Image (cartoon, grey):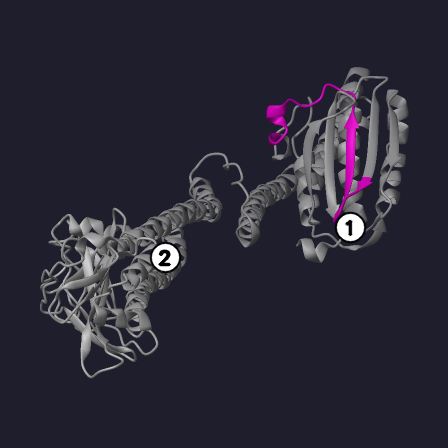
Amino acid sequence: MSIRRLLLAAFLLVSLLPAIGLTLLAFGQTRNAMLGEIEQNAHRSAGALSDDLDRQLYERLLNATTWSHLEVMQDLRLDDVDKRLSNFLAEMKRRYGGVYLALLAVDPQGRIVASSEPQRIGRHYAAITPWFVTKLPGGAVQIDPVAGGRLAIRTRLQSQFTEGTLGQLVLELDWAQLESSLDAVADATRQALVLDTQGRIVIASSGLRQRGAVPGTAATGWLPATPGTIQNRDGAPWMAVPVLVASTRSDGIGSFNGFGWTSLLLQSRDSALAPVQQMAWTFAGLLAATVLITILVSSWVAGVIARPVTALTQFTRHYLQPGPPPPAPPQGPGEIGELNRSFVRLVEELQRSQATLTQASKLAALGEITALMAHEVRTPLGILRSSAQMLKLEPALSSEGSELVGIIESETARLNRLVGSMLDSARTRPPQRRPDDIHDIITHAITLLGAQARARGIGIEFQADARDTMLDCDSEQISQVLLNLIMNALQILPRGGHVQVRSRDEAQRLVVEVDDDGPGIPAEDRIRIFEPFVFKREGGIGLGLAVVRQILRQHGGDIVADQSKLGGALFRFWLPRNHSEDS
């Protein structure tokens, strides 16, 4: 597995698992809170419905017991001959604005004596088995089963003058008004239902009435064992979808203990849980966005970290292959970038060390060969020179012979100087360091070559821009470097040429440049000219620049060739200010 994939997997594992865990935890907590709120709302609605029914019925029951003790009710004993009782009942019906369909006073034989509807006076009012019977402080009240959209409330009328009863006061309620209370809380997804203690339907909302939920019908299985809970069940036969059922039992009002009815609120499960489902989709979207952002960010971070490492690996593989060194890999951030830069510097130092070692080996071999040649060549050269000098002293020597002997002597001297020059170029010793001023060394080298430059008609200019000029170096070897570079320029420049030497400061080193306005060096030769036995000048042996680079590298510096602003060649070399750190 590549480092990028490994980092990507690690980032995703570290970031996604907590994100998913926290999202699921938050969803669970929010879901439970929303479900709790849904249950509370359902219970509040069911409780409000039950309280409203208790209030309405309690008011009607109070009306019945209160009116039964009025003095006007005693007119029933006289058959309401003056119609005072009928007028009272008609007035009460009018005042309550349609709550009552009819108010009746019935004698013990079941004959209607007084009524808010005059056409019913004299008719028979049949006694039936009551639906509910409850006791109030004003007396017992019975409720008949609902018939024809009417709910009849009956209470006894006691005689104030004799023992026994005068008959009954009957209040016929408009059952549709009670049904409207349930219809007010019902809609397409929610219905209301009220059951008595036997599980029979007392009242139902319109949607349930359309499905046969009429008063007195048994609602088998719908009466909860423990009111106040939420049931999750199938809605049949009252609703076509699964429902959540909230229930509450009537607690009564004041001294009225209620009928023990149970109010049910049937809510479509899909609509009830719609907020939870919407929240689930929201959390899913947030989680998907988090996963996507995490993958993108992790991929980018893994790429940023892995790319420099991969590039460094490729750089190392290419470096180990034959051929020119590969270009430096791109830098990375932080410690990765520092590792990259340190490794590239290590490789560059290794290349430099290899080149230095190769050149040193060549120079060492050259030194051995040169020493051997000097030993083998100088001896016969000395003999030839001595012989030529002796022949030159012979008196009988002709003028032509004397001339030839002079040629032999001068050529042997030239060969001896050539051998000495080769020895001087091939031998390099370790630098003897001591503090010295680089400007003094440059000025000394220019002075030594000043006469030769003037003789050739070449001008030498020194531009001293460096300020910190003290270096720990071998002044003799640095002088040799400068003499070689300036001499090379003098030998290749025509009369009227120009050589410029400049110094400048850099962060941790001092830089010296020697450039001229000569023919310059082709770009393809600017690296090779520092190798031994590579030369362009006629009569050269190709050792001077190799020795220059060897001396500078032994000092911890180096040299490069470039194009001069004057149009010719530029040699730039540098020396470290603190040799111990550079080494």
Secondary structure of the residue carrying numbered label 2: helix
| Camera-nearest residue between 417 and 402 | 417
Look at the image and tell me whether residue 380 can be seen: no
Nearer the observer, disc 1 or disc 2? 2
Magenta extent: 504-528
Q: Position of residue 305 (x, y in %)?
A: 48, 49
Q: How many marks?
A: 2
Residue type pointed to by label 2: Arg
Query: Which picture quadrant has residue 171?
Result: bottom left
Q: Position of residue 173 (x, y in %)?
A: 24, 59
- The residue singled out by tag 1 in the image is 474
Q: Is residue 67 left or right of residue 245?
A: right
Look at the image and tell me whether residue 272 can be seen: yes
Give the distance between the C-alpha atoms of the residues marked 1 and 2, in whole angstroms.
129 Å
Is 398 drawn above or below residue 202 in the view shown? above
- In the rendered structure, find residue 489 and report the number of the disc placed on it: none
Residue 96 painted magenta: no
Q: Is residue 389 left or right of residue 383?
A: right
| Camera-nearest residue between 222 and 336 | 222
Residue farthest bottom in this picture: 163
- The residue singled out by tag 2 in the image is 95
Secondary structure of the residue carrying numbered label 1: loop
Residue type pointed to by label 1: Asp
Q: Quadrant of the C terminus?
A: bottom right
Query: Is the residue marked by circle 2 packed among few (<14), some (14-19), or many (20+) residues within 10 Å?
Result: few
Compare marks 1 and 2 and give the one earlier in the sequence: 2
| Camera-nearest residue between 425 and 223 | 223
